[in-house]
């Protein structure tokens, strides 16, 4: 599976989902530095920059849990240097072009192999939570060349070709709670397409005609439709304003030169119009627009009264708060009491609530506990790093554990997972990293159907007494790297945990593959019947025992980059993708209970259709 030329479209999708990617968009400035360990060859580190009295711009790295550290000074070309050594390149907050280009090339490779499969992948992805992937898939589908052209013969139109640009339009226009693309993401699609790296790929693929200008495909047309529908439904437009998207909607309108049908559009967006030099504007010229709501000049008491009366969303509250007041204990308490914060808002605010002393208030503590219990993603694990209270930290971690379990509960219903960790001498400097990855991995799997072993020349089972971070750490306590490597010993250590007749098996290896030869005979002897290998390589070596064994067995081996597990949001997605990627097996003449694989899910996904109004 390491040879990308041998990957079909389905395998490319699976590998794209399982390989670590940095975020497509970063909300804070950073410095991009070379890193051969990453898929894209560089990484983004968050930084802050400050100008000294002598005019020199100093750059500091910001890492969670550690004091900020000076890494160098910034030059006019945005390079960051430590003396004469170039540390990296300073980037303002925004898109990470290297990630965008990597994503786009993966999609392009699938499209070149199978146009329809790529369109179904985009339609499938729309239903998922991976926003970065949806943005880049939508951008690609809006530009690819299958756009409903007439198929001609002897000067007559026989039929119209498939129009896969409709899929891209549908991704922009369809409304679906927690899955559709908000105005910022719509604008991000354009930003992606305007990147020189993406424009180059589109030119290589023959999309668009100009080699100099970025090709936007149907993005302008889709935005026109999106804006028109909201203008015709003012409640939707007002809802976007209340949600804090007023400026973003204005940006969208400006990017496409949108012409509203009435002044009401500008009034709702509080957008004052001035006549252009050529006099082409006709609506709302010189018309007084109601000033935007402002809390400037209000004291803390008045602001709390406004919150209790109007109950605005938390995002709007933070935008209206005067800088001289900011988020105070009283303001935060009033917002929570008025129900202005969603569960996610509360979880994100946990460190602030702790600093303000609000976690000592019983009603607020109970509200936070309830939000953590209902958490549907791993966000709490990330927030836990920033709180001081041991009790709160453990609650957040427990909430993240539960969210991960719920996320994969359905797809693991008919599957048994075997995790095998290399503890040989070659893992001396990597074993701690392996333990940390396993700790995160295990938390997303049901304890009754996951089995863990460590091995060197001998293997032994590790019993996880409690499916939590603390439980996994306790189970691995005292294990040290040493001895030779025999993957087969790890397999045999778990051979007494046979899968049921209606269960499939998945092996996940954590190690460096540093073993001479293969171990397929031990896999056969164990009778565990794995239908796929997942491999987290924590240390590079010149060996390929795991991949070679998978090839001998005729089963897929999907490489999982360990850095995926540094991002709590990616863990459930990675687990679901890996398990869904595993082929459905057959036990003798008895077929396992139906479990739809990832490839089947994509193939069975109906192509997205634009809404009737579009």
Image: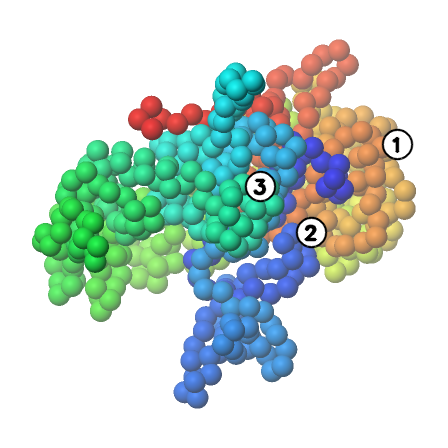
Q: CA distance from mark 2 to mark 1?
A: 26 Å
Q: Is residue 463 above or below residue 248?
A: above
Q: Secondary structure at mark 3?
A: loop
Q: Residue at x 72, y 12 (%)?
A: 590
Tell me where residue 279 appears, x and y as whole percent.
Answer: 18, 53
Label 2 close to label 1 by CB (< 8 Å): no
Residue for badge 1: 521
Neighbourhood count class around disc 2 (C-alpha, 10 Å): few under 14, some 14–19, many 20 upward: many
**Whole-number angstrom distance, CA of label 2 to CA of label 3:** 44 Å
Badge nearest the viewer, 1 or 3: 3
**Which of the marked residues, 2 or 1, is nearer the chain's N terminus?**
2
Mark 1 is surrounded, within 10 Å at the Cα level, by few (under 14), some (14 to 19) or many (20 or more) other residues, namely few
Residue 35 visible? The answer is yes
Q: Quadrant of the C terminus?
A: top left
Q: Which residue is mark 2?
A: 434
Q: Identify the mark nearer the N-term, 2 or 3.
A: 3
Q: Residue furthest top?
A: 589
In the rendered structure, the answer to whether residue 335 lies left or right of residue 588 reads left
Q: Which mark is residue 206?
A: 3
Mark 1 or mark 3: name the one nearer the start of the chain: 3
Closer to the camera, 205 or 365? 205
């Amino acid at each position: 599976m390491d040879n990308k030329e041998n990957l079909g479209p389905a395998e490319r999708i699976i590998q794209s989902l399982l390989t670590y990617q940095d975020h497509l968009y970063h909300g804070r400035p950073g410095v991009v530095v070379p890193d051969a360990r990453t898929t894209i060859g560089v990484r983004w580190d968050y930084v802050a920059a400050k100008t000294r009295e002598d005019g020199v711009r100093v750059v500091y790295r910001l890492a969670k849990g550690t004091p900020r550290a000076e890494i160098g000074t910034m030059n006019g070309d945005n390079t960051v240097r430590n003396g004469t050594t170039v540390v990296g390149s300073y980037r303002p907050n925004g898109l990470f072009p290297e990630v965008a280009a990597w994503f786009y090339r993966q999609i392009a490779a699938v499209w070149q192999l199978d146009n329809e499969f790529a369109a179904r992948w985009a339609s499938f992805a729309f239903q998922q939570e991976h926003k970065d992937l949806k943005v880049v898939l939508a951008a690609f589908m809006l530009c690819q060349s299958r756009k409903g052209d007439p198929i001609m013969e002897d000067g007559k139109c026989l039929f119209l070709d498939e129009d896969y640009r409709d899929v891209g339009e549908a991704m922009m226009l369809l409304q679906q709670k927690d899955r559709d693309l908000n105005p910022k993401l719509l604008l991000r699609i354009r930003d992606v397409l305007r990147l020189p790296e993406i424009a180059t790929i589109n030119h290589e693929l023959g999309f668009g005609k100009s080699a100099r200008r970025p090709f936007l495909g149907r993005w302008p047309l889709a935005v026109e439709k999106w804006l028109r529908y909201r203008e015709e439904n003012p409640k939707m437009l007002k809802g976007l304003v209340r949600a804090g998207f007023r400026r973003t909607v204005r940006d969208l309108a400006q990017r496409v030169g949108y012409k509203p049908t009435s002044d009401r559009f500008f009034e709702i967006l509080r957008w004052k119009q001035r006549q252009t030099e050529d006099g082409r504007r006709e609506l709302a010229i010189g018309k007084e627009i109601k000033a935007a709501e402002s809390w400037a000049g209000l004291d803390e008491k008045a602001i709390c009264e406004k919150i209790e009366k109007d109950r605005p969303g938390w995002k709007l509250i933070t935008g209206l708060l005067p800088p001289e007041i900011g988020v105070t204990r009283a303001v935060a308490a009033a917002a929570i009491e008025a129900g202005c914060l969603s569960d996610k808002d509360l979880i994100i605010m946990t460190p602030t609530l702790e600093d303000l002393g609000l976690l000592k208030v019983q009603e607020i503590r109970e509200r936070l506990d309830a939000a953590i219990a209902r958490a549907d993603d791993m966000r709490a694990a990330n927030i836990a790093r920033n709180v001081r209270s041991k009790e709160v930290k453990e609650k957040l971690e427990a909430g993240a554990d539960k969210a991960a379990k719920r996320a994969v509960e359905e797809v693991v219903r008919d599957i048994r997972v075997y995790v095998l960790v290399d503890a040989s001498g070659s893992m001396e400097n990597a074993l701690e990293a392996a333990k940390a990855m396993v700790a995160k991995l295990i938390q997303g799997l049901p304890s009754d159907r996951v089995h863990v072993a460590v091995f060197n020349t001998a293997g032994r089972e590790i019993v996880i007494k409690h499916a939590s971070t603390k439980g996994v750490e306790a189970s691995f306590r005292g294990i040290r790297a040493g001895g030779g490597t025999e993957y087969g010993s790890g397999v045999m250590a778990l051979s007494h945990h046979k899968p049921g007749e209606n269960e499939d098996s998945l092996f996940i290896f954590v190690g460096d593959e540093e073993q001479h030869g293969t171990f397929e005979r031990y896999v056969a002897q164990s009778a565990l019947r794995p239908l796929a290998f997942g491999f987290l390589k924590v240390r590079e070596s010149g060996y390929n025992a795991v991949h070679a064994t998978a090839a001998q067995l005729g089963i897929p081996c999907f490489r999982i980059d360990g850095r995926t597990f540094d991002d709590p949001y990616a863990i459930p997605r990675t687990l679901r993708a890996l398990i869904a990627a595993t082929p459905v097996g057959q036990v003798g003449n008895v077929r396992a209970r139906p479990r739809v694989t990832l490839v089947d899910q994509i193939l069975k996904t109906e192509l997205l259709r634009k809404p009737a109004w579009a």
